[in-house]
Structures are given as structure tokens and as C-alpha cells.
């Protein structure tokens, strides 16, 4: 009888822990992320998706959808779990998007995935790869992935474990989730936030932005299995890759806001050149 009660008690504790984790991730995230307090994280009103990481962690999202939105923009942070500032910037931008007037001239449906690699981010210490040791930004199904991804990893990186592309494309639940989001949400633009190289990259059709805040355009090329290669080159959807200068610190609040305003201005210019229909969508 005592053993049975002990089992029931342990199961109850597991369910309570799971419910608490599903209710709010902000205790963990605010303790880990730079320049993000518990109150700000809670204000982001993150929503639990149905997706889970390798270790069963919730992948959190936030939709901000005004009526008659003419554009859909997908913003992704922490594809690499040790790039903590990328997740922090995404949370700051959720606050900016939520404050956009409902009667803005270019209503935008924002979908934020601020912490794609939750296992890597919450690991101690944080890890670039996910819990299976896979670099999620090398795991997307670009053409000839089976040949090119393995060859690049072996020949160009010397089998660097931080850049292991996985056994096959979309082998990981996190990359599968983002792939499904791209297919279902059909974004006109993807913004992928990274660190720490301090550059702005761009893949895909149309003219790239020259700068966002203090970051200037420096197109560094594409990699087998990367999101920029898959989305921008293969699917024809513009992918803006933001490389923050520091993985452990965010830019100043004013700089993050300026980057946000520059991004809005860029999209406004595209609309002025012919509307949302000129920005491609994931097929």
C-alpha cells in the first residue's frame, strides 16, 4: 500500500511540474536570457504550441494578428541554443509588435518563435545544438542534402560536433516544427535571429535591406540544410538573418527598437512597390 501511494505521489508531482511548465516558461527564461525580466517575459504572453523538443520541452510561440493583415512575417530566435541574445531580442520585438496601432497602414500578422532550440538554451551551459547533438540550422531539406550536408560537415568543418547536420533532413522535432510552420503559416518574410557575428545577411528574391540598426549587409553565403538556403534560395521566400554582435548581451534597448523600425520601414517600402503580392510565400 505504501509503495502504491508513493507511485501516485510521484506521478502527481510529474503532472504538476508539467502543468507549471506549460502554464508559463518565464521563470526559466527570465533567469537565463539577458535583458529580459520575468515581467517582460510574462507580458509577451507566450502560447504553448503542440510541438515538443527532444526532451519534451514546450516550443513556445506568439501570434499578433490585426484584422485584415496584408503580410505574414515569421520571426525565429535561438535556433542555436547558446545564442541567448537572439531569444531576448525576439521577446523585445513581441512587445514592439503588440504596441503597433490597430489602424497601422500596413497591418502585419506576426508569428514569433523566440526559442526554437529550448533544450540547447536551457542546458547548463547552453549549447548550440539540440539534445540530439544536431545543428538545427543545418537540418532543413535543401536540394541534395544527403550528399552536400555530410560532405560539407566532414570536409569544411572537420566534423565539428557543433555543426553536425543530423542523419537526415528534418530528423529533429524542432526543425520539423519550424518546417510545418512555414508550410502552414505561409510567411511572406522570415526573420532569423542569430549571434555573435554582428552582420546582416539575406537570402532570397528581391533587393536585400542595406542595414538594420547598426548592422550592415554582409551576405556570407549559404550552407547545406540552413534555413536561409531552404527558405530563401529553394522556396523563394526572403530570409533576413540578423547576426547580433554578442551572444550573451543584447544591444541597447534603443538599438533594438531602431532595428525594429528599420525592419518595418523596409517592409513598408516593399508594399509601396506593389503590395504584399510581390513578396513571395512558401509554396
Image (tube, helix red, strand yellow):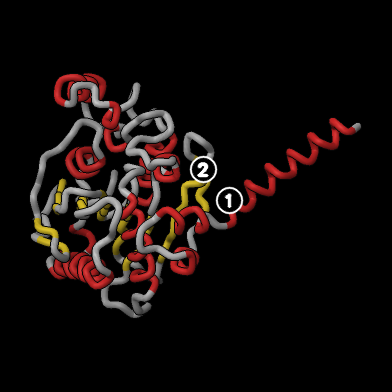
Q: Which one is nearer the viewer's eye here, 278 or 229? A: 229
Residue 251 found in image quarter: bottom left
Residue plotted at (17% across, 48% down): 197
Q: Is residue 175 left or right of residue 7?
A: left
Tally of marks: 2
Task: Indicate the secondary structure of the residue bearing disc 2.
Answer: loop
Q: Tell me if residue 175 comes above or below residue 214 in the rendering.
A: above
Give coordinates of residue 30: x percent, y percent. 45, 59
Image spot of residue 27 (x, y percent): 52, 57
**Is 254 rendered above or below residue 215?**
below
Residue at the spot of label 1:
21
When the figure is inspected, residue 131 is found, relative to residue 21, above or below; the finding is: above
Q: Quadrant where the N terminus lies?
A: top right
Disc with the residue nearer the chain's start (1 vs 2): 1
Bin the neighbour count of mark 2 within 10 Å (Cα to Cα): few under 14, some 14-19, many 20 and up. Answer: some
Residue drawn at x 35%, y 30% is: 134
Residue 9 percent coordinates (x, y): 78, 41
Q: Would you say the residues marked 1 and 2 are in contact, meaning their CB atoms lie under 8 Å apart? A: yes
Amino acid at each position: 500500500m505504501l509503495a502504491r501511494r508513493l507511485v501516485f505521489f510521484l506521478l502527481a508531482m510529474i503532472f504538476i511540474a508539467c502543468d507549471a511548465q506549460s502554464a508559463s516558461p518565464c521563470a526559466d527564461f527570465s533567469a537565463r536570457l539577458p535583458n529580459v525580466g520575468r515581467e517582460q517575459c510574462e507580458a509577451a504572453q507566450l502560447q504553448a504550441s503542440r510541438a515538443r523538443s527532444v526532451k519534451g520541452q514546450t516550443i513556445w510561440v506568439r501570434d499578433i494578428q490585426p484584422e485584415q493583415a496584408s503580410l505574414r512575417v515569421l520571426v525565429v530566435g535561438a535556433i542555436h541554443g547558446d545564442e541567448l541574445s537572439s531569444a531576448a531580442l525576439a521577446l523585445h520585438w513581441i512587445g514592439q509588435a503588440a504596441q503597433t496601432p490597430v489602424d497601422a497602414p500596413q497591418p502585419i500578422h506576426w508569428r514569433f518563435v523566440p526559442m526554437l532550440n529550448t533544450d540547447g538554451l536551457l542546458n547548463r551551459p547552453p549549447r548550440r545544438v539540440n539534445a540530439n547533438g544536431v545543428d538545427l540550422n543545418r537540418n532543413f531539406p535543401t536540394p541534395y542534402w544527403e550528399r552536400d550536408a555530410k560532405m560539407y560537415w566532414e570536409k569544411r568543418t572537420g566534423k565539428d560536433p557543433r555543426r553536425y547536420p543530423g542523419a537526415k533532413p528534418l530528423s529533429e522535432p524542432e526543425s520539423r516544427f519550424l518546417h510545418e510552420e512555414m508550410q502552414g503559416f505561409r510567411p511572406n518574410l522570415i526573420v532569423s535571429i542569430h549571434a555573435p557575428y554582428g552582420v546582416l545577411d539575406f537570402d532570397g528574391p528581391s533587393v536585400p535591406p542595406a542595414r538594420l540598426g547598426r548592422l550592415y549587409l554582409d551576405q556570407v553565403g549559404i550552407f547545406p540544410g540552413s534555413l536561409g538556403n531552404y527558405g530563401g534560395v529553394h522556396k523563394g521566400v526572403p530570409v533576413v538573418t540578423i547576426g547580433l554582435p554578442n551572444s550573451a548581451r543584447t544591444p541597447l534597448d534603443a538599438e533594438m527598437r531602431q532595428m525594429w523600425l528599420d525592419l518595418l520601414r523596409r517592409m513598408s517600402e516593399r508594399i509601396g512597390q506593389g503590395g504584399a503580392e510581390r513578396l513571395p510565400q512558401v509554396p
